[in-house]
């Protein structure tokens, strides 16, 4: 199951179980900085997120040449705000990222999300 079919199945499952999305307060913006900023952290894990989704451990593949993998704003590939410098899996299956953020506005954002193409999915009821 991919793309639209996956989203539709997830919506139907939420309706059937009368499940509401998890509401989380907005994070505060960071202080403005001058010049590029290097960020590090967990890009993806098998933890269940606020949409009740998760990635299987070690399930995300990425190109060997990270120069082809831009850091973008709002999942919009026309808004490149930085560059992914490293992606590595930890022993626990979490995907760690190191990226350079060059955009002035993006440097104030306290979090990021990944954009992935789902090739295979499983819904566990």
Image (cartoon, rainbow, N blue to C red):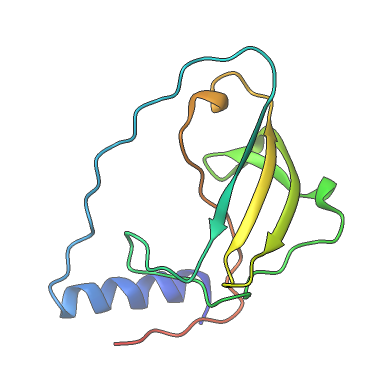
- The picture places residue 108, in percent across and down from the top left corner, at 50, 24
**Image check: 96 left or right of 74?**
right
At a point 18% along the width and 73% down the height, the residue shown is: 15
Depth check: give the residue in front, 55 or 16.
55
- The picture places residue 59, in percent across and down from the top left corner, at 62, 75
Q: Is residue 48 above or below residue 112?
A: below
At a point 39% along the width and 69% down the height, the residue shown is: 53
**Image check: 47 left or right of 85?**
left
Q: Is residue 57 above or below residue 34?
A: below
- The picture places residue 94, in percent across and down from the top left corner, at 57, 66
Depth check: give the residue in front, 36 or 77.
36
Number of numbered discs visible in the structure rendering: 0
Residue 100 in which image quadrant: top right
Depth check: give the residue in front, 8 or 56.
56
At a point 35% along the width and 87% down the height, the residue shown is: 124
At a point 46% along the width and 34% down the height, the residue shown is: 110
**Image check: 92 left or right of 28?**
right
Quarter occupied by the C terminus: bottom left
Which residue, as the protein is rendered here, is positioned at the far right? 65
Residue 37 in which image quadrant: top right
Depth check: give the residue in front, 51 or 12.
51
Which residue, as the protein is rendered here, is positioned at the far top? 34
């Amino acid at each position: 199951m991919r793309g639209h079919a996956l989203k539709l199945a997830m919506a139907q499952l939420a309706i059937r179980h009368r499940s509401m999305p998890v509401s989380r307060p907005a994070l505060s913006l960071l202080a403005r900085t001058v010049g590029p900023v290097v960020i590090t952290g967990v890009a993806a894990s098998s933890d269940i997120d606020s949409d009740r989704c998760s990635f299987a451990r070690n399930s995300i593949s990425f190109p060997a040449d990270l120069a082809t993998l831009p850091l973008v704003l709002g999942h919009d590939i026309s808004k490149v705000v930085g560059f992914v410098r490293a992606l590595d899996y930890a022993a626990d299956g979490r995907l760690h990222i190191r990226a350079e953020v060059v955009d002035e506005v993006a440097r104030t954002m306290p979090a990021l999300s990944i954009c992935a193409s789902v090739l295979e999915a499983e819904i566990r009821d």
